Image: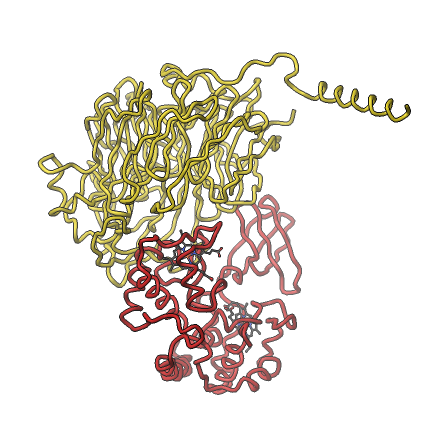
Amino acid sequence: MGLNAKSWWRGVFALGALSLTTFNLPANAEDGGNLYNTDYDVAQGRSYFERQCSRCHGFDAKGNDETGAPDLTGRLNRASSDVGIFNILRNGIAGTAMLPVPETLPDTLVWQLVAFVNSLSADPANIVLPGSIAAGADLFTGKGACNACHMISGKGGRLGPDLTFVGDRRSPEELVADLIMPNQDVEPRWWRLRITGRDGITREGFRMNESSFSLRIMDEDDNLWSYANNQIANYERIEDSTMPSYAQTLTDSEVDDLVAFLFSLRKEN
Amino acid sequence: MQRLIGFLFLAVTSFGVIAQEEPFQTVITPAFSPITWDRLVNADAEPENWLMYSGTLSSQRYSRLNQITTANVDELELKWAYQIPVIDRAETVPLVVDGIMFITEAPSNLVAVDARTGGIYWRYDHEMPDDILICCGRNNRGVAILGETLFMSTLDARLVALDARTGNVLWNVAVADYKAGYSKTAAPLIVKDKVVTGIAGGEFGIRGFIDAYDAATGERVWRTYTIPGEGEPGNESWAGDSWKTGGAATWITGSYDPDLNLVYWGTGNPGPDWNGDVREGDNLYSDSAMALNGDTGELVWHFQFTPHDVHDYDSIQVPILADINYQGSQRKVMMWANRNAFYYTIDRETGRFLVGKPYAAQTWAQGLDVNGRPIRVPGMEPTYEGVLVSPPIVGGTNWYSPGFSQDTGYFYVTAFDGEQEFFKRDEDYEEGQRYTGGGGRYTQPMDAFHSSIRAIDPATAEIVWEFPIQPRSSAGITTTAGGLVFTGSADGFFFALNARTGEELWHMSLGARVHAAPMTFAVDGKQYVTIASGNVVYTFGLRD
């Protein structure tokens, strides 16, 4: 952490200052819908959320694989406006575990919930980042050689997550962390398995699926392998990332540029 | 003319083909015969039928059927599948009565099918109010049968009696007010001429109870609250008025010992779940096993697994009853792998603790004292900021059925080794609102944890073997005289293990999470095993 601290704190500082601007903007200019949008309303919404919604969506609203409830802190799939969220809450999502809120729940409280859900993700259009998008794009395929591992819009490698819409799922703070502390919170899909077969051959690859009776990996040459448990002599998990840390190899301003570029990779752009 | 001959020819051949392929063209006997109380007491003597949720009154889930064995289980093949029309998760354990299978569906429907083919006889769709409050999904786990009547719990907190031959409603009574957060998901238990049943809603500040209804009329015969009222012994274990909203729900099926005339039932967490400040005391009889007189409902003894619980460690498990050799003498015991990650063997005549040990990862207790009371590790209560504790809220195990084999003498449980950050919140009780006072949060992805099937020796509480599977399994277990343990996994497998060694003998990917327990039965002398996965009920049998 010591080595990374400098650029980490700089990243946070820059964003902290910027997100203040977000607060001053009139909320929801398009639909003019939500009149219940003060800090007090958000707090009311949060308290209802923690009580009634968190058991599926999680206290941090980051979703839960077991209940199938999605992460609400990024871009929503089914609503792009306050009214859209309001309708989801009132009507539920048919055929899923997402039931409507009780009919007796006053509209005020539903709007407060909408305000809370909104507060989970800052409107990206209001976030101004210090880096240059164009310079970031050059770094991505140039000095950074990120495209050796990552695809954007169908171009690039297969040895890391597709980044085509990475700005929808990662905040600028998280993107900074992705670049300088890749070993933190590696998603299980990007863990690796080192498998020694009954035939004595050892192969290593990304953990595409580890099931109770079989394993599937992709090795560094993009080969896909499937092992039944009875073909395996032993295997181990490696939970570190294969992505190098760029804390040393990129300057602070290069990190800024890459973050600006990555954050611009959103569906609306 | 040409044409007519062709037509006749076809008609005749197709008739011939049908006659040849139908397996039951010679003797057809009517399916179904009435189920007397005697037949229920001796359910293990007719293993071709699966007459109650846990197989027998002792809830061992052990079947004497031995056609499918360790030697031929790898020849199992799919015989039929039934697709549940309402998309939700299936937690059903069907009953089979003389060739008819009764399958419950979400939210509270029932279908009767031919157990050989899955072909439908009738279905019952329960009319549901649209303002029900439910804690944990729209499930129904099964029905009970007595005579020619099926008994089903419904999400809107009612008990419905249906004619087993037609699905017609015989009676339909309210057990509690669904508007206050009560609901019902578990299969009832028949005790003589009564239908014994519990209640869900522990997250809504209810006061739990166990009820018995007259099977013929639906009239309530007795009700025993799981939280003693004012003036009753145990009420002092709740600070102030906290007992009124103390939870202790009873949302899984219990067991019955006909010789002792005792009904055994587990109780849920005290409410609010994670903030114990408002309910100082042991909070009796939350997180307990209660033994009730089968005729009167009177409490005969109780054993509290987790006094003053603040982690939602429900004792909503199915008690397994067996007579075992314990330290040189034959004892009537009750076996219990608790959500709190400890396994217990208890004398079921007296409620005395015999032996207990952890069977899954746990950090909240140093161990159990001589009376089976946990010795707590300080500092493991939820805080406003969060404290990391094992097991997590979902527990070392949970409501899914464990099993016991009369051949090996082992107890089998689906165990989970996980951890979670627990935190508390200040909340006031409002009727019909969730009342939990906090929650939990995983700090690692689910893939970092482990589930296992574990075999436990009830005489020592030691783990004999384990079979690891992907987390987090919520499948129940069934054992057979063929030397097998059948269960499922979270990643959609149905599989069979050697009951003695834990060796895997057969597995099949069903493609969706298994939330139910398997069951086994026979028709026309052929053994089958059935399991629900996703929204489908699958039935397997040996190659013909």
> Is B264 situated above or below A110?
above
Q: Which of B501 and B513 is in front in this view?
A: B513
Q: Which of B155 and B346 is in front in this view?
A: B155
Q: Which of B356 and B34 is in front in this view?
A: B34
Where residue A150 appears, as percent x and y from the top left, is 59, 71
* Left or right: A180 in relation to B22: left
Q: Hey, which residue is sitting farthest left in the picture?
A: B231
Q: Hey, which residue is sitting farthest front in the picture?
A: B1
> Is A73 situated above or below B219?
below
Quarter of the picture holding the C terminus of chain B: top right
Look at 57% across and 42% down and name the residue there: B509
Look at 53% across and 63% down and name the residue there: A190
Where residue B158 appears, as percent x and y from the top left, is 33, 34
Q: Is residue A16 visible?
A: no
Q: Which of B180 and A119 is in front in this view?
A: B180
Look at 45% across and 24% down and name the residue there: B50
Which chain is tinted red?
A
> Is B225 situated above or below B206?
above
Q: Is residue A227 visible?
A: yes
Quarter of the picture holding the N terminus of chain B: top right
* Left or right: B266 in relation to B478: left
What hue does chain B carry in this figure? yellow
